[in-house]
Image (cartoon, rainbow, N blue to C red):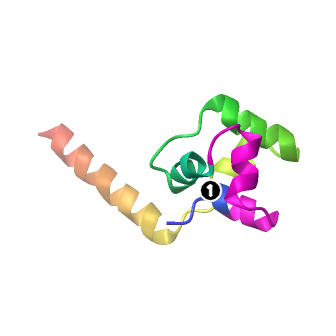
Amino acid sequence: MVTTVRVFRESKGLKQEDFAAIIHTSKVNYSKKEKGSVKFSLNEARAISNNFGESIEQIFFAHEVSKNETREKRNKRCTEIRYEKR
């Protein structure tokens, strides 16, 4: 799964090492964060955001949701509601 932060980084033509330097961590640790196995701290998100003059939301959160994701969430919620009524 490609994360929005990865897409943002690549759109700037930068390497993981570059972003790792911005948040003062190793490339290995940054890679784990970008893949989602380790979360970015708020301070790290701010550092990246401030460095590029972009909001945290623009860098770290997806703006579009696929129809499949929307359908899956709706179906899950419908199932939860059915169980709550029992």
Mark 1 highlights which residue?
62
Residue 15 higher or lower than 19, as above or below: below
Between 27 and 85, the residue placed more toward the observer is 27
> What residue do we see at 70% from left, 37% from top?
24
Res 64 quadrant in image: bottom right
Residue 71 higher or lower than 49, as above or below: below
Query: The residue tagged with tag 1: helix, strand or loop?
Result: loop
Between 82 and 46, the residue placed more toward the observer is 46
Residue 42 point in image, percent of width and height: 64, 31
> What residue do we see at 38% from left, 57% from top?
74
Residue 26 point in image, percent of width and height: 62, 45
Q: Quadrant of the C terminus?
A: top left
- Which three-letter amino acid code belongs to the residue tagged 1? Ala
Magenta range is 7-26
Q: Residue furthest top?
A: 43
Between 68 and 49, the residue placed more toward the observer is 49
> What residue do we see at 49% from left, 70% from top?
67
